[in-house]
Amino acid sequence: MRKPQSPAELGFTGHDRRRLAKALLQARNSKVYQRIQAVLLIARGYSVDDVARITGSLRRLIYHWIQRYLRRHRVDDLDDASRTGRPRVAPKITKARILRELARDPLKLGYNTTVWTTALLARQLSRRYDTQITARTLRRRMKELGLRWKRPRYVYATKDPHRVQKKGRSFDARGKSGALATSCSLKMKQSFRGSAAYRKLCQFLYREQVSACADISA
């Protein structure tokens, strides 16, 4: 069985231990802290098995971290490597182009509808800018723009209650003249009831009623 190497045999120096101890106090990321701690313990003479038990790390990872640090003796090499990430899908379809197509009427573009759907707009964008974009990707970009898709709501058409008032000026004139005639008739009735002729009419009707009652009793 091979004898474990000492920190000096591995390549660690006192300066490495001080550098690692200082970096451990300044670490804010838990994963970076774990790596620095593991390498520092190895630099202080702990075995790989002991370090794996203390830090809860795998032995193969500890060996990997030791190699990463000793390659240039830089603590930064224990940080997470930068990742390029997944390339953006359909880079030609920008936010401005999405809004521009969304403002257009799909019926005028040859589609048998006046309302955009996610799938239909994705189809139009893919055809116009010669790049493929799925409805799912488009929906995600629309969300980034602060837009939400809503289903169109259909309602039954009802008769306009004010349609008669919209027939035209001539009808309005007739309606106003009729209302004016009714008002005049009411005013004439009110003025007639207070006149002397109205009182005479009431006296005449009263006498006729008394005379009719007398004839019946005779």
Image (cartoon, grey):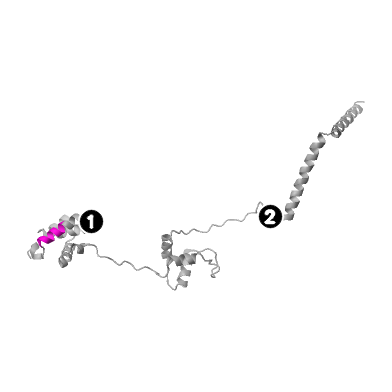
Image mark for residue 30: 1
Position of residue 215 in the picture relative to residue 69 (left or right): right
Amino acid beneath label 2: Lys
Position of residue 201 in the picture relative to residue 16 (left or right): right
The residue tagged with tag 2: helix, strand or loop?
helix
Which label sits in the foreground, 2 or 1? 2
In-front residue for pair 58/12: 12
Task: Kindly identify the residue that appears in the image at 20 percent across and 55 percent down.
Answer: 26
The residue tagged with tag 1: helix, strand or loop?
helix
Q: Quadrant of the C terminus?
A: top right
Can the viewer see residue 5 in this picture?
Answer: no
Report the Cα–Cα distance between label 2 and label 1.
Answer: 75 Å
Task: Judge whether 110 appears above or below 26 on screen.
Answer: below
Q: Quadrant of residue 184?
A: top right
Span colored in magenta:
13-21
Q: Residues within 10 Å of mark 1 (few under 14, many from 20)?
A: few
Residue 37, given in percent of the width and then of the height, sits at: 17, 57
Task: Kindly identify the residue that appears in the image at 80 percent across and 37 percent down.
Answer: 191
Q: Residues within 10 Å of mark 2 (few under 14, many from 20)?
A: few
Is the stretch drawn in magenta largely helix, strand or loop? helix
Q: Quadrant of the N terminus?
A: bottom left
Amino acid beneath label 1: Ser
Can the viewer see residue 17 in this picture?
Answer: yes
Residue 7, given in percent of the width and then of the height, sits at: 9, 62
Residue 15, given in percent of the width and then of the height, sits at: 11, 61
Q: Which residue position holds label 2?
A: 166
Residue 180, given in percent of the width and then of the height, sits at: 76, 46
